[in-house]
Amino acid sequence: MEGARVHRILWLIVVVAFVVGLVVPDDSQVDECAARDTRVIAPYPITGYWVMPRADACVTRRMVEAIHSIGADTLISFGPRFNASPDPDFADCVVDGHPCAQVPGKEVRHVYTYTTSEEFGPGLLRCQGLDRRIESRGRIFYRVGLGASCADRVQDLVLVSTDGDGLGNLMAEAAAYGMRVFPGLPAAPQRPDKTWEPDQAHLAALNAFTARVLADYRARFAGSAAFGGVYQSFELAARDRADDDPIIALYAAQHAVVAATLPGRKILVSPYIDARRGRGFPPEQVAAGLADIAGTRAGAPMAIAVQDGRGTGKVPVHAPNERAARVAPRLVPVVGDVSNAQAYYGATRDYVEAAARNVPPGVELWVNVEGFEPAPAAGECGRVEPLPLRGRTTKARLDQQIMAAGTRAGKVISYGWDPFFTCQSRFDTPSLADDIVNGARQPIIVGASRKDMNGRPGILVEGHNLRGGTLRFDPQGMVVRQEWYGRGRLESAWAPYTPAGPWTSITATNGTGQTSTSPYVLP
């Protein structure tokens, strides 16, 4: 997942269009935005998405409405980079006739910059005269001193640039739609020579600034049901880490700030997995990776959303009987035209199952399905910048990823809404979000097991949209009518059947006549 690099890129939103029906007017403010439509018209098992906060309140409302309409209740944003290098974008910041980086009577040791889409409140500004909200040359800036005391003569400064209150808009709309938001923590500066590691020389300044940002969130959002917690924006692999791992050290320090400033708020982390032989790691290392991450939570509740790796091509989503099959065509540019077993240590299901067997105390297991392809196909929309280019995927591929997430993930979320779920190859072609709406009743089986009922052998399947209809069992080609249905966190259906071989492919057709896009394979 690569969204941490795109927080300064504002994509043009192509929102899913819906028929206007019941609307709930917004009485809390007078604006020119269209009234909210709070219906959920096409619930889908992905219930959270990464989004980019938008300064335009009406664009934000349309985006949140579209996401909510397909059953999502969670919005996640990346934290902007806490930049330790000079940034020419801040030349417009002038206060009292001087550059903002100059403070009369103070020695400025280091100037950090932070480009965001939110307007802070007084919780960010502690020192009168030093800490200021600045309107300069048509733009809004903030200046924040990081000294232990306002009286300290030597100060590190943070200059903040914002294009508007995108996060505030997101919080307001999420509250109106009954959703939760996880704003991204400020992302650590990266080492110039190892960009995948944080620059530890600046971690003290990062943590001081994080504390100020979170204190402001506490003041502005503590009373909002939409404030779900915070997202850790700096990524790491879900594998065994060294005792002196710099990313774990970053996590421990920054998460301690979260626990102290926002007690009881959840920390969301989304580590990646990499199954590529020679570059990645086998599923057996996932348990140690989760334990290392959980060890940084400082007593705060934590959700670990394992990235499934399919979008980047680091992990396949093939069935357990397809290890000897050739890799999917869109994975060939990543690993070559070889078999799944030659290219990868395992599939997504293997890694998620390893994680589910080893969830640490105080942690919820989520799965983050990557909603894109490693590269765009000809004529296909996707991500244009920053590099690498990424392509749009299909609902059938997403269904496979949801199947691979299995029965034990507490929540399935996805990176990322824009542009992958909203882009259109042409103006008259559907977006991926449109395809989800159109296929909303298709069954998805996420688990299956042998189970006797009333003394009869059969197969119990779990998943979504299973009610009524039949189960088809291959390779025998037998179609058997369901004889039992139940509903809990997942739907369940049972049919009498005894597998005749080592692998059984199960396809569901529900009472509406809709059929699952891919079979579930029972070992």
Image: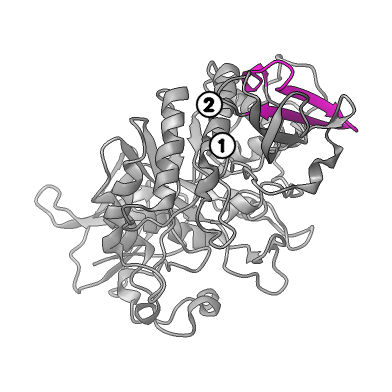
Q: Position of residue 181 (x, y in %)?
A: 55, 32
Residue 20 shows in the view:
no
- Residue 214 image point, x, y percent: 55, 27
Query: Looking at the image, which is closer to me, 495 or 193?
Result: 193
Look at the image and give the residue range highlighted in magenta: 121-145
Give the residue displayed 63% in from the left and 42% down from the top.
80
| Mark-to-mark CA distance, 2 and 1 | 25 Å
Residue 1 visible in the picture: yes
Colouring chosen for the image of the structure? one colour
Give the residue at mark 2: 227
Q: Using the image, determine if residue 461 lies above or below residue 113.
A: below
Q: Position of residue 503 (x, y in %)?
A: 25, 72
Q: Secondary structure at mark 2?
A: loop
The residue type indicated by label 2 comes to: Phe
Quadrant in which residue 146 is drawn:
top right
**Secondary element at image label 1:** helix
Residue 103 on the magenta span:
no
Position of 398 compared to 479: left or right?
A: right
Where is the C terminus found, in terms of image quarters?
Answer: bottom left
Residue wearing tag 1 = 205
What residue sits 35% from the left and 67% below the top?
Answer: 281
Q: Amino acid at mark 1?
A: Ala
Foreground of the two, 463 or 419: 419
156 or 451, nearer to the observer: 156
